[in-house]
Image (spheres, helix red, strand yellow):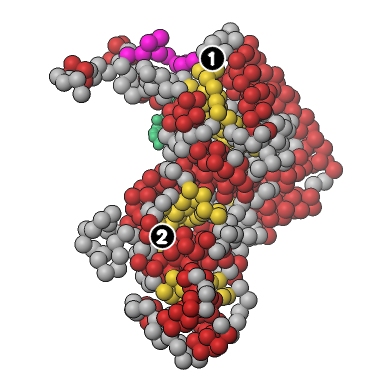
């Protein structure tokens, strides 16, 4: 074999002759192919040109790769020669990817082939691209590690678009790939699965999209996708190439992602930090708004420290995560309205600091009202100054920003100012204790013991049941979350649905559990939301991801029901009870039966007592490594719900002439 290699390297024999010699020497065809790849890599590293007798030359295979320097080894840069699909796999490994979330794509054959000998890259087959992409996003969010979603051409991509939208809104670094079925020698002919400019379909909901123009550009395209997604502020990227590039033999470079990461972990401008610190210490009533950049930067402890130094109350505007401990005496609750003016307390903040919130404006009123001075600290500079006036902009990684601000405030705090902060903290505590007592009155609801269960009781029971460090994935429609006392500094964590393309909950929970196998994961999901994406249950069963899924099954789109009435109050719909858009009963869907079909045990519960027993069974299952689903029958609440809601009278039976 040594002679054979020497002959091949010195170009005495062709590639075909080399492989033939190896098989004659007793190697299997695939083993011979691996040896060829390994030897070819060496020869490329030595600066050898194209191989004589190589497979029929596609233009890019014959020409030396423009981007590939010939020699000198550089750490983290590996020369590569082989099929485009194998370059794809190697570059993913170099990007730090461990999991590929995919759906069957025949023309990725060379990629699948490459996986056989690359066990470090694990492929998770997801039977629908939507929940599959949600699973990838859940994994990325809970692990902080890169992953890729791949699917068949535009047909597969279209199913994942909803979750790409969620990733865009939630700023999740999700990288998605699908090939173009139209190959280079037939593109533009309106062929099978062809649509012009496929990558443009997702352009408005991605940070970066690109169609590679040559097979040897596959690794560079992947690197740019990951760089764009993982450079703060994070967001999804979409990469694509013609499917024949996966089969083409290429000479190119595989480069470690670290070597191209701009490492945008930015410290704030020191002058602005001084101005911010001065405003904060001199404030009569400062107020902090927290946001998801805190969770992403693991900086919740620092946010607590800054709040405590100043005796500053803390709130949050709609986000994905809980970014501040909800049991902390300075926590005054989430903002329910459209403006900080609508907080019950404090009523008169004169300095407001935002730490890492993107601010979802759902109304014409600016969330930060005109008047108070506004310090805006975040890396997502794009929306700064668009709606609200910014007195002090602090563009930075919020971890560094909080460090610097804490140090600057410390310098300025005199004993008198410290005393003021202590008094203010006592005032805030009075409010937060009152709010806690008020919230606890929830259990006095006259319907508390009712069957079907009221949503608040269901949430409360799950909160009593959940582990102290449980992760709650929440896609339970119009259900108001309470009683969990989330705490990002080591207690319970929240993964909410901010993007609101429904059908993400079950997939997200599966991905979160994959990333955090040692924490209890509970998925709270509305029946309508659940039915948009249950296929991830099958992944839970196959991968033994012991998630507890609780479906709030009111057999309805309860939220849309109430919102339609709010939009057309007292109209014909309310008068007649004819709502076409909201009732999912008759027949009632049985989510436990659906779960069984995916290999997940479960049960339907009607009463609070049954619920407790079901939760105990759920725990038993998860301890044994099995997922479990509880289909909780929940009361329909809101105005104008009939006991038996009206259904549009579309009677096909009357049209049926034949018994077929
Ligand atoms: C993919 C998708 N389709 C439609 C909607 C519109 N939508 C918003 S809430 C909702 C109903 C959710 O129902 P369910 O999960 O049962 O919660 P409930 O309103 O009953 O509390 C729908 C259909 C959406 N957000 N996403
Ligand atoms: Mg519902």
Frontmost residue, 45 versus 340? 45
Q: Residue at x 54, y 22 (%)?
A: 603
Neighbor class of circle 2 (other Cα within 10 Å; few <14, some 14-19, many 20+) is many
Quadrant location of the N terminus?
A: bottom right
Q: CA distance from mark 2 to mark 1?
A: 47 Å
Q: Identify which residue, 400 or 652, lies in the foreground.
A: 652
Whether label 2 lies within 8 Å of ligand 1 gets the answer: no
Q: Would residue 501 appear left or right of 471 to someone viewing this image?
A: left
Percent x, y of residue 13: 45, 88
- State which region is magenta: 634-646
* In the depicted structure, whether residue 140 falls above or below residue 461: below
Q: Which residue was labeled with disc 2? A: 108
**What residue does disc 1 label?**
606
Quadrant position of residue 283: top right
Tell me if I can see residue 63 in this picture: no
Q: Nearer the viewer, mark 2 or mark 1?
A: 2
On screen, 91 above or below 423? below
Residue nearest the observer in this picture, 362 or 278:
362
Q: Position of residue 429 (x, y in %)?
A: 74, 28
Q: Is residue 503 magenta?
A: no
Answer left or right for 205 relative to 100: left
Residue at the spot 45% in from the left edge and 79% down from the top edge: 20
Q: Position of residue 459 (x, y in %)?
A: 59, 23
Residue appearing at x 55%, y 64% in the figure: 117
């Amino acid at each position: 074999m040594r002679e054979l290699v020497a002959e091949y390297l010195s170009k005495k024999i062709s590639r075909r002759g080399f492989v033939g010699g190896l098989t004659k020497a007793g190697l299997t065809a695939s083993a011979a192919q691996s040896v060829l790849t390994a030897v070819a890599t060496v020869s490329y590293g030595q600066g050898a040109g194209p191989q004589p007798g190589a497979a029929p030359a596609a233009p890019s295979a014959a020409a030396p790769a423009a981007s590939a320097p010939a020699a000198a080894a550089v750490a983290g840069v590996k020369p590569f020669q082989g099929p485009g699909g194998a370059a794809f796999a190697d570059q993913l490994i170099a990007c730090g990817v461990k999991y590929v979330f995919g759906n069957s794509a025949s023309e990725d054959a060379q990629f699948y082939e490459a996986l056989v000998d690359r066990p470090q890259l694990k492929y998770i087959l997801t039977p629908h691209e939507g929940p599959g992409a949600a699973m990838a996003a859940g994994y990325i969010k809970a692990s902080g590690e890169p992953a890729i979603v791949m699917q068949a051409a535009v047909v597969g991509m279209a199913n994942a678009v909803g979750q790409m939208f969620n990733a865009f809104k939630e700023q999740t670094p999700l990288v998605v790939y699908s090939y173009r079925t139209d190959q280079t020698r037939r593109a533009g002919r309106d062929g099978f699965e062809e649509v012009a400019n496929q990558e443009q379909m997702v352009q408005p909901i991605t940070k970066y999209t690109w169609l590679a123009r040559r097979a040897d550009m596959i690794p560079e395209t992947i690197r740019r996708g990951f760089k764009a997604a993982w450079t703060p502020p994070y967001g999804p990227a979409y990469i694509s190439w013609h499917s024949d590039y996966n089969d083409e033999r290429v000479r190119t470079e595989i480069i470690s992602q670290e070597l191209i990461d701009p490492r945008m972990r930015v410290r704030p401008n020191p002058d602005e930090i001084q101005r911010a610190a001065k405003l904060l210490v001199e404030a009569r009533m400062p107020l902090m708004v927290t946001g998801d950049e805190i969770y992403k930067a693991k900086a919740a402890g620092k946010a607590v420290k800054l709040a405590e130094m100043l005796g500053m109350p803390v709130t949050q505007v709609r986000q994905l995560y809980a970014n501040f401990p909800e049991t902390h005496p300075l926590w005054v609750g989430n903002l329910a309205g459209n403006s900080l003016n609508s907080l019950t307390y404090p009523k008169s903040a004169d300095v407001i600091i935002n730490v890492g919130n993107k601010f979802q404006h759902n109304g014409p009123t600016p969330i930060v009202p005109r008047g108070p001075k506004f310090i805006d600290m975040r890396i997502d500079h794009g929306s700064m100054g668009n709606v609200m006036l910014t007195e002090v902009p602090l563009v930075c990684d919020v971890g560094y920003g909080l460090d610097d601000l804490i140090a600057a405030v410390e310098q300025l705090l005199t004993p008198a100012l410290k005393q003021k902060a202590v008094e203010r903290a006592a005032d805030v505590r009075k409010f937060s204790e009152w709010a806690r007592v008020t919230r606890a009155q929830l259990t006095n609801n006259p319907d508390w013991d009712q069957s079907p269960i009221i949503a608040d009781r269901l949430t409360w029971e799950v909160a009593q049941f959940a582990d102290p460090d449980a992760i709650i994935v929440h896609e339970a429609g119009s259900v108001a979350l309470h009683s969990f006392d989330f705490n990002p500094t080591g207690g319970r964590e929240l993964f909410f649905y901010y993007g609101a393309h429904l059908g993400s909950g079950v997939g997200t929970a599966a991905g979160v559990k994959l990333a955090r196998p040692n924490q209890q994961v509970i998925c709270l999901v509305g029946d309508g939301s659940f039915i948009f994406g249950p296929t991830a249950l099958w992944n839970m069963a196959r991968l033994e991801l012991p998630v507890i899924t609780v479906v709030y099954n009111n057999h309805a789109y309860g939220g849309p029901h109430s919102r339609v009435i709010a939009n057309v109050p007292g109209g014909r719909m309310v008068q007649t009870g004819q709502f076409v858009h909201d009732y999912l009963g008759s027949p009632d869907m049985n989510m436990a039966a659906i779960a069984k079909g995916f290999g997940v045990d479960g049960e339907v519960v009607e009463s609070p007592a049954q619920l407790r027993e079901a939760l105990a069974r759920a725990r038993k299952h998860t301890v044994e490594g099995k997922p479990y689903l509880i289909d909780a029958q929940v009361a329909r609440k809101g105005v104008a719900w009939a006991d038996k809601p009206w259904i549009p009278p579309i009677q096909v039976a009357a049209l049926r002439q034949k018994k077929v």
